Amino acid sequence: MANDAYNESTRLIIRATLIAGFLDLGSAFVYAMLEGHPPLGVLFAIASGVWPGARNAGLAGMLAGVLLHFAIMSVMVWVYVMLARRREWAVRHPFIAGSLYGLGLWCVMYLIVLPLRWPAILQRVSMVSLGEQWFSHIVLVGIPIALLAARDRQPPLRKVAMAMDG
């Protein structure tokens, strides 16, 4: 029984990581293109957070960016899943909880994590880029994670009925 719960949690974390991770990465590619930058440059930028030479590393730098992005996203998902298990409110109100979580993720990334590597990062934030960042963190990351976590926490009989329907 405990093993089943572990497997379900693992599947939820993997699924939510992939969905939110691809949505977030896709938005970063679009924003890069809109600014006239090559979309794959996003992967080098991600990797350069921990590997300053990633921009000159070719395929290895891009792969490092993908792996780092999804590793960070898996931590974001795991934290939300653990919080949602302790706060029934988050399961009952996934849009509100996901929005708040997405905004919290933005705060952690842009007010703590990124300034540790790039201290002047907030000086380059415009109203447009702030809107893009909030959209990505709230709508493409926080809300999908919250919806998937809420769906996973539905009562077992409802899950069986949903599985039978399709």
Image: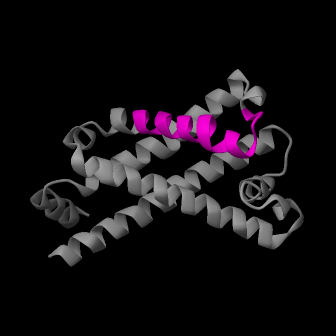
Horizontal side, residue 54 vs residue 159: left or right: right
Residue 140 position, x and y percent, is 52, 44
Which residue is farthest right? Answer: 56
Residue 33 position, x and y percent, is 79, 44
Q: Which residues are magenta?
A: 99-121
Specify the color scheme. Answer: one colour
Residue found 22% across the figure and 70% down from its top: 5
Q: Considering only vertical position in the picture, is 126 above or below 47?
A: above
Which residue is farthest top? Answer: 127
Count of number-bearing discs: 0
Residue 94 position, x and y percent, is 32, 40
Whether residue 139 is visible here, answered yes or no, is yes
Q: Considering only vertical position in the picture, is 152 above or below 137?
A: below
Horizontal side, residue 150 vs residue 74: left or right: left
Q: Nearer the viewer, residue 25 or 125?
A: 125
Q: Quadrant of the N terminus?
A: bottom left
Q: Quadrant of the C terminus?
A: bottom left
Is 127 within the magenta?
no
Residue found 45% across the figure and 42% down from its top: 142
Whether residue 150 is visible here, answered yes or no, is no
Residue found 86% across the figure and 69% down from its top: 58
Name the image quarter holding residue 136: top right
Most frequent secondary structure within the magenta stretch: helix
Residue 93 position, x and y percent, is 27, 36
Horizontal side, residue 12 vs residue 6: left or right: right
Horizontal side, residue 123 vs residue 141: left or right: right
Q: Nearer the viewer, residue 64 or 159?
A: 64
